[in-house]
Amino acid sequence: MRTFLDALRDSARHTQKGITFVRSDGRETTLSYHRVWSDARRRAGWLARHGIGRGDRVVLAVPEPDDFVLSFFGVMAAGAVPVPVYPPPTLARLDGYRASLSRIVQACDAKLFVAGHRALSVAQVEGGDDTLATVPSVAVDELSDGPETDLAVEVGLDDLAFLQFTSGSTSRPKGVMVSHRNLAANAQAIMFDGLRSDPDRDRGISWLPLYHDMGLIGFVLAPIFAEVPVVLMPTTSFVRRPSMWLDAVHRHRGTITFAPNFAFALCVQGISPKQMAGWDLSSLRALGCGAEPIDAATLRTFLDKFEPVGLPRTAIMPAYGLAEATLAVTFASLEEPLTTDVADPHGLMRGRAIPAENGHAVEVVSCGTPFPDHRLDIVDEEGAVLPEREVGEIVVEGPSVSRGYFRDETESRSVFRDGRLFTGDLGYRAGGRLYVCGRKKDIIILRGRNYFPQDFEKIISGVEGVRHAQVAVFTRPRAPLPASDLAAADDLLVAVAEVQNSQVGHDALRRAVVGAVYEQTGLRMDEVHFLRRGALPKTSSGKVRRRETRARLQAGTLVRALESESASHDPTAEGAPQSPVGDFQGSPPAPKAHPNQSAQEE
């Protein structure tokens, strides 16, 4: 087993193979592994001359792929610990970003802040924040200003490789401690056990954020261990033009790429037949999906659309993982078509994944099996291992599991117990495969039955006028009620959704949302609130923050698209039948996909 620095140093013998960087202006540059190592040592030399040494934490907020990767490697080559954070989306409004950055800088006790923009490195100090003002900052282009330096810094497998901050907490960020041993073990699992990669055949293609574990480990660090060349593109370029992702697969003959579920939906909606003309996607053999809930229908639609231009249906590879396990925990098998389980919805409410027999079902995507040398169990509230088809918390152990959160013993003790990682995710096993249902803390309980918020969110996303996948559903307490009013004892069922057009008629849209949810679940939404585009709270990796949304709704700080009303304000509204909450009436629920939640980010 090698440290990452050993692997990077070994790869430097290649003067032809390397990394292709695509900048936000479209310029492509390919640097050989030899050149990458040389540039990393140059940046390490700059850091050493400025007092950065073994174990020091260096925060990186760098948007361009080449600047980020070379600086990340340079920090490691100096013996320091890189701390990647998301760069600001714009320099126009830095107040909110500065507050989030300040919490991370304080949590990791950073010794240096490296910014992608010179303006940001100045603005963060001038912002008046005491924490940031005490940390030196530098623009990224200054790091390469100097001669190449061959530092004699040695690191061991149990030394800290980098800190991966989870993006869900707004007040107390948690830095996952990823050691060189964790990284080497997960790279082995991903590149060799899961992908069976071949450096002479394979090429990775990625637009994933490099400050997030799937982009950073999956397409920057792990490929170095396998010496598989990659093409790295800016995330913002994909969001503006989804076709650039698959166009890069075609042009570079990519064989491996991954993305969250939303990207598959975006490509189906946003890529025209004209853009697809001439593509050949037959080189793609591993098309991974993870990092957020996985919807079987979305993946099938994607495969249907791009199969005519060569995409193999067997390329699809659902996966499960989380930052606390470095990255990946399970992969679906290569050359296996999309596999799902069809479960009875009433059984799932009771915590059992009973195979559906009457045509009314919930479809759950298989995320495959654990890697060698890793173990995955499903446990109950007392930690006892459950049999197949019993829903419980997913627990992981093995060499990829981190030893905890940086300088946070309380949180570490609650999540990492005796070498086992209690993920907070709910799932079950069937036929040896993992099926993920949702987050333990997000379960909605109404009249003694359990519901997954993702089911409601999927239904609401399908209502015309609501932005796809920009929905949060949760419960909140009712106002105090008379003790005799048992019928209204449940919490309120609340939906918050972004609208496609702020001029849309919200009363009609609200009725449509309430009606759609009732038709498919038999439950009635108590409140429906609408937001302007981009106002829904999300993590840095794009996941909806349900608990923050609920807190901000309670505090009255959500930016509304229009003054919202409770659905219950119009008890006779069309599509809102007055039936007991929790009872199915008329047609039972239409098939819906339970999700894969793949990181502890809320």
Image (cartoon, rainbow, N blue to C red):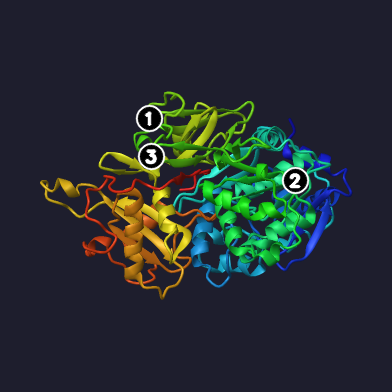
Residues at marks 3 and 1 touching, judged by CB atoms closer than 8 Å: no
Task: Give the Cα separation between the discs numbered 3 and 1.
Answer: 21 Å
531 left or right, relative to 22: left
Q: Dot 2 lies on which element?
A: helix
Q: Name the residue tied to disc 3.
A: 345
Q: Dot 1 lies on which element?
A: loop
Residue 145: x and y in percent read: 79, 61
Q: Residue at x 55, y 39 (%)?
A: 324
Q: Which mark is residue 381?
A: 1
Q: Residue at x 43, y 67 (%)?
A: 465
Numbered disc in front, either 2 or 3: 3
Where is 513 relative to 349, above or below?
below
Task: Give the Cα separation between the discs numbered 2 and 1.
Answer: 44 Å
**Which quarter of the figure is the N terminus placed in?**
top right
Camera-side residue of 166 and 51? 166
Q: Name the residue tied to disc 2.
A: 77
Residues at marks 2 and 3 touching, judged by CB atoms closer than 8 Å: no
Q: Residue at x 59, y 55 (%)?
A: 263
